[in-house]
Image (spheres, grey):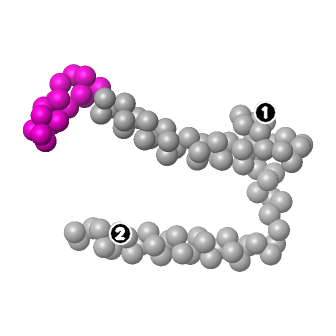
Amino acid sequence: MMRRVLARLETPVGRAFIWFIVCAAFVFLYAPMIVVAGAALGGGARPVIEFPPSTFSLARFTSIPASQYRAIWLSIELASAAAIVGVMIGVPA
């Protein structure tokens, strides 16, 4: 059974199917990040998020309340620590 499935995936149609699945997974993963990044850089005068933005600006980032800076730095520190630990575990493997 498994040999028949693998044999079908080695055909040109099977390879095209695999490429389609891989591309669909990339779109599924990256499309929301692109929309959020584009909406964050939007510089409209309205507080409504629009995509694609009409103008680009960093105004939304300058309006972060000062009370949130501690949380932002904590997130950056935790992400850095997780990345370092991940590299330390992954590189020797």
Residue ID for mark 1: 54
Quarter holding residue 89: bottom left
Percent across and percent down for residue 65 are 83, 68
Identified at 36% across, 38% down, the residue is 22
Viewport quadrant of the C terminus: bottom left
Query: What's the residue type where badge 1 is placed?
Result: Ser
Q: Which mark is residue 44?
A: none
**Which badge, 2 or 1, is on the more N-terminal residue?**
1
* Residue 3 lies within the magenta run: yes
Q: Nearer the viewer, residue 49 or 11?
A: 11
Q: Quadrant of the N terminus?
A: top left
Check the image and report above or below for 32 versus 92: above
> Badge 2: how crowded within 10 Å, few (<14), some, or many (20+)?
few
> How far from the left and from the top, in percent, is residue 46?
89, 43
Q: In this figure, what is the number of numbered marks?
A: 2
Q: Is residue 6 left or right of residue 76?
A: left
Query: Outermost residue, front direction?
Result: 1
The residue indicated by pointer 2 is 87
Above or below residue 19? Residue 74 is below
In the rendered image, which quarter is residue 8 located in?
top left
Considering the whole magenta stretch, tell me its main secondary structure: helix
> Given contact means CB atoms under 8 Å apart, are the residues at marks 2 and 1 in contact?
no
- Per the image, label 2 sits on a secondary structure element best described as helix
Residue kind at label 2, given as amino acid type = Val
The magenta segment is 1-16
**Residue 62 figure quarter:** bottom right
Question: What secondary structure is marked by label 1?
Answer: loop
Nearer-the-camera pick, 34 or 1: 1
